[in-house]
């Protein structure tokens, strides 16, 4: 039965979910949207970040978001290493289209299997001081376990937007896929710039993974639930558009929340991708694509 209170709660929940989806998609927006690297292993690093937060929470009682921030340099270095292997083995030889895709699929498989062997297939969840808390405004409930990841996700989006637009390395990242020759004339090494960008993308995924496990329990195969979402948000928002990523994430979050509330969760993702296909039919470059 339709209810205005139910509708309001679904919309608010969708907005909060959209902020989290923005954080999840930032890395792929950077790597796929700007570097043109189809890193299908990105969701595996998301789940790896979730398990890092779980281990630190179990062992030392650390908040998952604090763990995500502390582990950001570690995942940045891991991402830089992965790109260097990818570049030396495939991109430098011009074989990144197919064999590079297989490489990232292998990385995804290795991470997922390793986590399964180490931690099994039982769901893992962390406890925080805000897990069970909520506030209510006019009949609309706001759960802190959604509000906090949303705020962090929006902050991550703003930080990346400012980094890309107002720093030398940020502008170099945006330029590297457009004209590498001109970039060299500006005193920047394209390989080094791509390494930095890839590292930032993986670090963003790990921090998003810490947000994820504070919202819902995860298992190693949870990464499969986010492959489609990441690429859908990136394409819908416009390739490489950080602001577009946030808008597309909010749209996807609201649509999923409405469909789950009124028609059941099984319809949410299908309708979300239907909106993506419809939007691309009208505007192939995405909402904010050039």
Image (tube, rainbow, N blue to C red):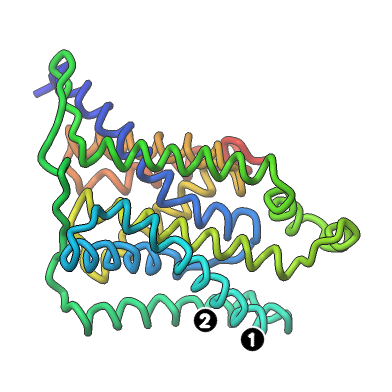
Seen as rendered, the residue at the extreme right is 185
Q: Are marks 1 and 2 in contact (CB under 8 Å)?
A: yes
Residue 52 on image: x %, y %: 29, 67
In this rendering, the count of numbered labels is 2
Q: Secondary structure at mark 1?
A: helix
Q: Earlier in the sequence, mark 1 or mark 2?
A: 1
**Residue 282 occupies quadrant:** top right
* 127 relative position to 205: left or right: left
The answer, for residue 281, to whether it is visible in the render is no
Q: Which residue corresponds to the image point at 49% horizontal and 76% vertical from the top-left?
A: 104
* 180 relative position to 247: left or right: right
- Between 70 and 222, which is closer to the camera in this rendering? 70
**Which residue carries the number 1 mark?**
89
Q: Which residue corresponds to the image point at 32% horizontal and 48% vertical from the top-left?
A: 270
Q: Decide: is 101 above or below 2.
A: below
- Between 110 and 136, which is closer to the camera in this rendering? 136
- Between 217 and 11, which is closer to the camera in this rendering? 217
- Between 38 and 63, which is closer to the camera in this rendering? 63
Quarter that holds the N terminus? top left
Seen as rendered, the residue at the extreme top is 138
Label at residue 103: 2
* 123 relative position to 46: left or right: left
Q: Secondary structure at mark 2?
A: helix
Q: Decide: is 27 above or below 118.
A: above
Residue 124 on image: x %, y %: 16, 64
The answer, for residue 55, to whether it is visible in the render is yes
How would you rate the neighbour count of disc 1 (Cα within 10 Å): few for under 14, some for 14-19, many for 20 or more?
some
Residue 252 on image: x %, y %: 38, 39
Residue 117 on image: x %, y %: 22, 84
């Amino acid at each position: 039965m339709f209810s205005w209170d139910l509708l309001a709660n679904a919309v608010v929940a969708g907005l909060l979910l959209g902020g989290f989806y923005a954080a999840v998609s930032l890395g792929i927006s950077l790597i796929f949207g700007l570097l043109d690297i189809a890193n299908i292993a990105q969701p595996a690093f998301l789940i790896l970040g979730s398990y890092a937060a779980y281990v630190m929470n179990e062992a030392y009682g650390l908040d998952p978001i604090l763990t995500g921030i502390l582990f950001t340099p570690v995942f940045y270095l891991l991402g830089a290493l992965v790109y260097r292997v990818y570049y030396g083995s495939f991109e430098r030889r011009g074989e990144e289209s197919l064999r590079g895709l297989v490489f990232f699929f292998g990385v995804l498989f290795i991470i997922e299997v390793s986590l399964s062997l180490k931690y099994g297939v039982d769901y893992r969840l962390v406890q925080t001081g805000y897990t069970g808390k909520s506030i209510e405004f006019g009949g609309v409930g706001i759960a802190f376990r959604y509000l906090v990841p949303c705020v962090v996700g929006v902050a991550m989006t703003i930080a990346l937007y400012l980094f890309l637009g107002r720093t030398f390395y940020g502008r170099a990242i945006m330029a590297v896929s457009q004209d590498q020759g001109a970039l060299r004339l500006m005193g920047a090494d394209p390989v080094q710039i791509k390494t930095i960008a890839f590292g930032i993308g993986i670090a963003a995924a790990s921090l998003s993974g810490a947000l994820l496990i504070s919202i819902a329990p995860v298992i190693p195969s949870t990464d499969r639930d986010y492959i489609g979402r990441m690429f859908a948000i990136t394409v819908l928002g416009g390739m490489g558009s950080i602001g577009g990523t946030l808008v597309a994430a909010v749209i996807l979050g609201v649509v999923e929340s409405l469909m789950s509330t009124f028609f059941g969760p099984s319809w949410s993702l299908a309708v979300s991708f239907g909106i993506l296909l419809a939007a691309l039919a009208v505007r192939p470059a995405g909402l904010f694509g050039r």
